[in-house]
Image (cartoon, rainbow, N blue to C red):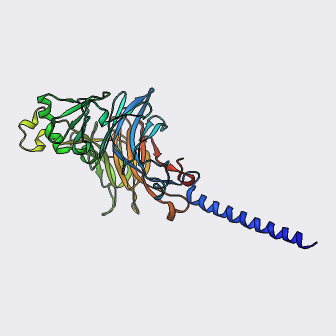
Amino acid sequence: MTERPRARAISFVALLGKAAAWIGMTAFVAVLFVVPGPMISTAAEVGPGIAFAEVDGRDVAIVSYADHGYGGLSFFLPWQHDGRVIAIDLANGETVWDRGIADTVGALTVLAAGEKYVYLLESTELSVIDLEDGSVIARAADISGLENFEVFQAEIIHSPQRGAIMLRPEDGPVLEIVLDTLVAVEVDAHTDATWSCVLERMGHTYFYGIPEPVLVDRTPIDQGVLGFGVPVGAAPGTPGKRLSRADTHGESVAVGSKTFVAGQFVSESVRNEPQPGACQTAQWQDDVFPDDESSPVALGSDSGFVVIEHDINARDDDRAISAVDTASGEMLSANVADWGVTNARNAPDGGAVVVVQRFISGALPSLNVAVTATVVLIASDGSMQEIVLAKHGWFGLPW
């Protein structure tokens, strides 16, 4: 009579043990995949090129990124998609749409956006997607005139002046696709003489054609030239430098009291258009441009601020970006940049979009730390908002 209750007690204890083991294992996995909060991991690579457009009355930035997933699990998780494109509302940072476009090794290149379509490039494919929702409209073979086009052997560049995608097959004539069309046509002889050597030289936009942002020590502004100077009375070797403005008479005046360690101005590289017909007479490939291939334009220069990349402080050489008023030197906003700026463009509304390399980690940094690209929206008033891409939570599921 006493054995049965004892057996039941033993069974109950065993059940509790199994339950505890299951709960412990679940908690362990949850810690690996779900800290802090639902988002624990992100590993995104942002591609070259940022385009601006309007979707349903909202001004958006079109950005491509590769979602590398959680810590090497991307090969096993079918919902992780490498080549993605996102439309971000510039006013509030909301995602208008986010689409997987292609299985690629890295991120796609955003060539241009019109009023209907966005044009994208990867190493072996040219894609056209709908601006309204990001759905794929056409690949290269679907574009009239490109039925037998080998993207990998071609040179492809966007010309803002012509409002077209300029293409040149290997040893072939220059073609152009006017934005918002799906037709590639051969250009006239004069246009071919303007672009043939440019495409031959610059080529393969996913490697060379999109100029990278530049960091400069001096930048022109409405009130003169802005640079950095050692604060008056500072001890020799003082690492921090203060903004200084040189007026039209060459006089240098300190701007504000904030000092920056290893500070430089973040500038967008704007590619210059070639001189008409230059390929016929140019002795050197550089001769096809009126000046240089590209010109630096300081971020925020049309809105009265500059963006400075600098060390966090004299004891921490991780980087940060700060928006600073050019007249008063007042710090308007700042954002951690860790490894620095990798992409930057001025926005049509007077703001800017900056891509930085960040460290993102959960509660167990040794297990889930990741270097990832984030998008920083800078409004025309200099305020910043950081957008984290490719966020993953439970078991690597998108969050």
Q: Is residue 33 above or below residue 380?
A: below
Task: Return the x and y of residue 10 as percentages of the image width and height.
Answer: 81, 70
- In this view, the residue in front, 228 or 151, is 151
Task: Return the x and y of residue 292 as percentages of the image width and height.
Answer: 17, 42
Residue under the point 18% across and 40% down: 199
Task: Return the x and y of residue 88 as percentages of the image width and height.
Answer: 44, 37
- In this view, the residue in front, 86 or 349, is 86
Residue 290 visible within the image: no
**Which image quadrant is residue 305 in?**
top left
Q: Image check: 278 left or right of 183?
A: left
- In this view, the residue in front, 88 or 17, is 17
Residue under the point 64% across and 63% down: 25
Residue under the point 22% across and 39% down: 248
- In this view, the residue in front, 144 or 287, is 144
- Quadrant containing the N terminus in the rendered view: bottom right
Residue 227 visible within the image: yes
**Residue farthest toward the bottom in the current orientation of the protein:** 3
Q: Image check: 252 left or right of 18?
A: left
Task: Return the x and y of residue 153 as percentages of the image width and height.
Answer: 22, 45
